[in-house]
Amino acid sequence: MTSRFFAAGYSDSDSASEEELVSSSEEEEQLGSSSDEDQSESDSEFGSDSDDSDDSSDDDGGRIRGPSYFLKKSHDDDDSSDDEDTKKVVKSAKDKMFDELSSCIDIVSLAQLDGDWIKVSSEFDRLVRLVNRAQQQNMGVPKIYIKAVAQLDKAITDVQEAEKESKKNMNASVAKSFNIVRQRIKKVAKEHSAQIQLFRADEDAFDRETSETPSGTATPSIDGFKVVGKDGKATGTPEVADVFKTLETILASRGKKNVDLASQIAELEGLLLETTVPFQLISIYLMLIPLRFDLYGRSAYMPVAEWKLAEKNITALLAVLEANADKYAVTETGVATEDLSIEPKANDKGVKVMIGSVASLVERLDDELTKSWQSIDPHATEYVERLKDESLIYTLIVKCQLYYESITPASEFATVAGEQLARVVLRRLDHIYFKPSKLIIYSEEVAWTTLGGKAESVVFGKYSASSEDSKYASGLIDALCSVLYKQPNSVFRKRAVLSHIYYYAFNDEYFKARDMLLMSHLQSAIHTSDTQLQVLFNRALVQLGLCAFRSGLIAEAQQALQEIATSPRQKELLGQGAQRFQQQQTQVDKQRLLPFHMHINLELLECCFYTASLLIEVPAIASSPEYSRKRQQSTRSFRRTLEYHERQIFEGPPENTRDYIMDASVALQKGDWLKASDLLNSIKIWGLLKNQDSVKAMLREKLQVEGLRTYLFTCKSYYEKLSIASLAAKFELPERKVNAVISKMIYSEEINAALDQKAGCIVFIQGVEITKLQELALTLADKAVQMAERNERLAAGGHQNNQIGHQGNNNSGNSNNTHAHNSNSNIKLAPVTGALQSAPGTISGALNGMDRKYRKNHSRK
């Protein structure tokens, strides 16, 4: 039984079978069948099989069976003879395209004759789209299209002349469509001017050439490739016209939809193998490399294999330019020619400057590498493997810098002409400013070894084995930044100075970095800069704070780290991530993030800030537990954390960095500096510092000094005298150091005491310190003043009344009184008059409780 896909129609009678056999044999003779086996396996056009007709006619139920469902036919006994006389015509895609073009051209011609320019405009747009689709399918530009454009151009000229003679204007909508068609025809005629001229020169020859081209024997070819015969040997070579015709076709399709970029890349790669002319090679590379980037423009990042191909193409382009430096150059300031095949005119030096941007290609390649770092899991081995490609891009950047140095005079480095060099220098700086000296030297060594011994840089000399690592790295950073400082564009200067500051701070040169930051005045206007510049500023500021901490400058470290460390958006401020959900993060926000290997450790940042706050705040809290909290607003985060830690009923062992620091704070408040030192040294994050031993030794010394200060603040009201020798033994400090600390505290009026050098002790002056009750009373007075001001503001409709000057004077007097209490110059509390205008002097009288005469006189007034 035959398959239903090959089933044929059968009849009951023998005569019908004989007719089918005859018709089947006649068809086979007409089609030229060669074997009976092929006939039995093939599907008959008319639905009959000569070999099986007799057997099938016996089994059939008297009705002709229709062909397969998939052939979309239905037959019966009445119309079977009509189907036998009809043959199905199958058109190729090229024929269908030709018919569609012909139909569209006919509609345009009829509409043009009727003067319906609105319809001409819409149909001509459709015609252009059809031609573009034909070009994408390698069918070329149909000559009927050239003929239609030429005729339509002539018709437009005739209409314009007729309109001038008749002095009659068209309808507004018709005139608008007419102008649109005229502009589009002008553009298309310019693109195909050569073929249009051939048509106008001899229309009959143009048509005859079209008709003489055999449609069935045309050999499909791709412009720019060799035609290969059956033996595998090339039968021809591409000519100059073929190369640039291919480039023009690809250039015309840029930015359009449904363009096969992969085939265009393969086509250009084939051209590279066939040509050795420098001008052609440069033109092909300038077209090929952007196509590689466009092919993966919508992807998360460029595949590694394609990225390396693009890197090789850019390297090859630079090699061609260097080999022909006396003939050709590629810059953004070059003049574009109307035809790609026409070489630009030579300048005074005999060099033909082609328009293009090697710097943009290098920047795009660098951006693709950064995108891959941003997309890959930083904890996977793939990320480590991808990091190895940084040496390739760094070498390419150095090579590109050398090229721009060769074509740009040194006198033009600081002008607009040197901007391309500045962009490449900035990319080179971005790859090394955050690295230690050893890694910078490694990158330089690999780059200069790859480039060879003949390469030499004007900006900074190449690395040699005799160069000292730290001096060479610092000199390289200084040289690169000096080029950027001379640029007229302020963005280059700002990025250069921030990178310079970061490098100095990273290499423990705090005072250089600090002075450079203060002289730049960037902090006053950084909020108006773009996001990437703000991120770089925050990174430089944090690195400056970490440098101050490593150098033992605790107050400077806390001041620099405070704004970033206390912010809930640390990751966003440093360009290391987003605090919000990932779904809300746009693609632009993701591209602003820095790769993982450039991140600053946030735990180390927090650890340094809280440790610095510990050394500053614990003695301050001990000196004035309540009132100093009001005076110092910069350390609220540390104090809140410490208060929360102290309120815990059950305190378990420290688990994270903050717990260790809070436990150390509690121990230091009790004077146990040794326990505080052990807790801080137990923090594992110190291992990220390259000089962790010196940092731990510095922290131990600071804890000894601050422990001594805290002990004196806490115990000053319980002692009349304290031996300096006992203090030195308790805190393991030399007596000379203890004397220096105590003298400084007395001089700054932190304690009211005297230093008896003969007896070797410190003598406390009792009775001049304010008590706990007085501190609370002062706090209450301040809160009452604030409440009164708030009530007055509400009564005035949200604004201060005309007595604000009087209150300001009273408040300033109050602050002076507070300073008098803190300086311990007078044991009596000065009156806080004007705190409440409804009962002036009441609070002050309640505080001192001693001057009745003053209160009576004040009440009489």
Image (tube, rainbow, N blue to C red):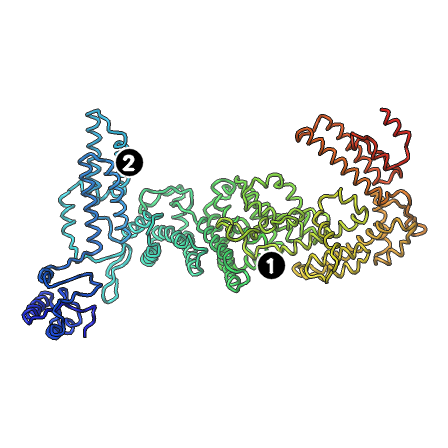
Q: Label 2: how many residues lie within 10 Å, few (<14), some (14-19) or many (20+)? A: some
Judged from the image, the secondary structure of the residue bearing numbered disc 2 is helix
Question: Left or right of 627: which side holds 459?
Answer: left
Which residue in the structure is indicated by mark 2?
180
Q: Position of residue 280 (x, y in %)?
A: 34, 51
Inter-mark Cα distance, 2 to 1: 65 Å
Q: Position of residue 256 (x, y in %)?
A: 34, 48
Q: Is residue 109 above or below residue 175?
A: below
Q: Residue furthest left?
A: 15
Residue 553 in view here: no
Q: Residue at x 42, y 59 (%)?
A: 306
Tell me the kind of residue under disc 2: Ile
> In the rendered image, which quarter contains the C terminus?
top right
Question: Left or right of 429: which side holds 793?
Answer: right
Q: Residue at x 15, y 72 (%)?
A: 40
Judged from the image, the secondary structure of the residue bearing numbered disc 1 is helix
Q: Residue at x 66, y 31 (%)?
A: 798
Q: Position of residue 682 (x, y in %)?
A: 72, 62
Q: Residue furthest front?
A: 61
Q: Position of residue 418 (x, y in %)?
A: 49, 43
Question: Left or right of 580: which side holds 773?
Answer: right
Which residue in the structure is indicated by mark 1?
438
Q: Label 1: how many residues lie within 10 Å, few (<14), some (14-19) or many (20+)? A: few
Which is more toward the observer, 475 or 17?
Answer: 17
> In the rendered image, which quarter contains the N terminus?
bottom left
Q: Nearer the viewer, mark 2 or mark 1?
A: 2
Residue 22 in view here: yes
Tell me which corner region of the image, top left, top right, bottom left or bottom right, holds residue 482: top right
Q: Is residue 55 above or below residue 728?
A: below
Q: Earlier in the sequence, mark 2 or mark 1?
A: 2
